[in-house]
Amino acid sequence: MPHFTLYALTGHWGPNPIKVAAFLEQFGFDYHVKLLDMNSTDKETGVKGADYLEVCPNGRTPALIDHKNNDFIVWESGAILQYLANKYDTEGKYGGKTPEEKAIIDEWLFFQATGLSVPQGQLFYAKTSWKGKYDEDAPKNVIRRFSDELQRVLAVFEQQLKKQTEKHGGERAWLALDRITVADFTTLAWLGLLPNYGEPLEVDLAKFPYIAKYIERCEALPAVKAVRAQIKH
Amino acid sequence: MPHFTLYALTGHWGPNPIKVAAFLEQFGFDYHVKLLDMNSTDKETGVKGADYLEVCPNGRTPALIDHKNNDFIVWESGAILQYLANKYDTEGKYGGKTPEEKAIIDEWLFFQATGLSVPQGQLFYAKTSWKGKYDEDAPKNVIRRFSDELQRVLAVFEQQLKKQTEKHGGERAWLALDRITVADFTTLAWLGLLPNYGEPLEVDLAKFPYIAKYIERCEALPAVKAVRAQIKH
């Protein structure tokens, strides 16, 4: 029995399960990935099926089961990262050593979850899935609304990464602190989509050089490579 | 000098600053509210003005300054609640006493921030502000998309509050644990909008009896009353 079971989506896994998988790899934890089918209500394999709704009442991935802690269940990627940090990173290397470090990490953790994922996710849906769902092209102002907001939010990340680079140097320019933290694991999974999905997302990374460098550094992490390798097969 | 400065929006404050204000009231902390003008770039009074962007690079409220901790600044309402809990609630009454309690609190904290506020906020915008911004009625499928999702998410809250009521009794049926936690402070500010904005949000609280009771109990809290009283004047 592996230490953890992680739930993700069949095929691409989804950015939120990837956050957790990369963090588990960083720790060197042993985990099993259980894949669920998107939009399916199949009892055993559906993300909206009865079995998974017992694990996660929201019917979304990821969720994590900790088999070495009485099969403790936690869902919501932000909560999972915090649980792993609180439970297994007792020195606060990734989760923060003081309330002040924790606060800076949490700022960027929540900003990714609420600020970045909304326009990026909604814009991607509008460009790729709206027509299949609603039998019309996505209205132009829907695209405008979420594209404008995505550009604004990316500029906030760009500015922060520039600041961090000037303060700590390029190799230690992580999002929250001068070392990699849960704020980076939550963010790399979403920003990491930009090189492949720049076109539907209307994002030209040449305009965000600090983000582009950050993505390169994140993708070069052994933990991230290990996750991407599993998804490709 | 009060212990804290809290930034909120002129007029209604906004649900996210209200989360923080209610939690500060619960602790009995002394705080000053600095109001900023929405959409304004005025240097001193604008939420997108130069002065406030120094405090919060995202140009959104709330942000909090802790004057008894070297004017330490924290922004993102979820991060602020966690900071207050980590720094001042050292026994974990509101933030959780164990990694497992913290995980359950975090699940609902993140679910509010990412699950509830997106459809509720987007639907409210579509119904009340879309026309002013884009010079057209909000497209019907925008309304359908966020209304469907809001109903789905509210059903998840309803089911959880039902479970908590059956497990702990009506008076201790808080969202995450059998006592009030930061998960409730984050949620009460958003669910608390439903009685006044049920019509634009297309939410009939008669269909969500556990949520309706929960809102009543939250609004009856002295901490919440103290906040609402300040906003009304």
Image (cartoon, coloured by chain):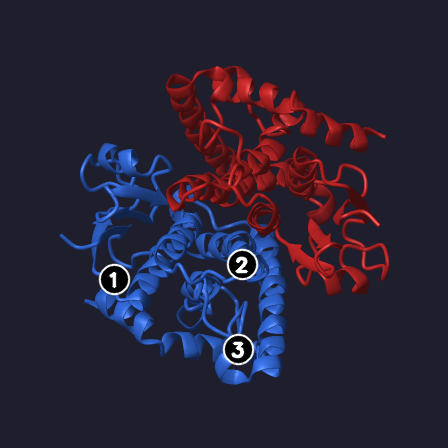
Chain colours: A red, B blue
Above/below status of B85 relative to A152: below
Numbered disc 2: secondary structure: helix
Q: Which mark is residue B29?
A: 1
- Location of mark 2 (residue): B102
Numbered disc 3: secondary structure: loop
- Give the class, few, some or many, for how many residues have Cα within 10 Å of label 1's Cα (few <14, many ≥20): few
- Left-right relation of B17 to B3: right
Q: Position of residue A62 (x, y in %)?
A: 69, 49
Amino acid under disc 1:
Phe
Which quadrant does the C terminus of chain A fall into?
A: top right
Residue at (37% x, 75% y) in the render: B219
Q: Nearest to the eye among marks 3 and 1: give it.
A: 1
Q: Chain of mark 1?
A: B
Amino acid under disc 2:
Lys
Residue at (35% x, 63% y) in the render: B23
Q: Nearer the viewer, residue B219 or B65?
A: B65
- Location of mark 3 (residue): B173
Amino acid under disc 3:
Ala
Q: Chain of mark 2?
A: B
Q: Nearest to the eye among marks 2 and 3: give it.
A: 2
Q: Which mark is residue B149?
A: none
Number of disc labels: 3
Q: Position of residue B37 (x, y in %)?
A: 25, 46
Q: Does the image show residue A180?
A: yes
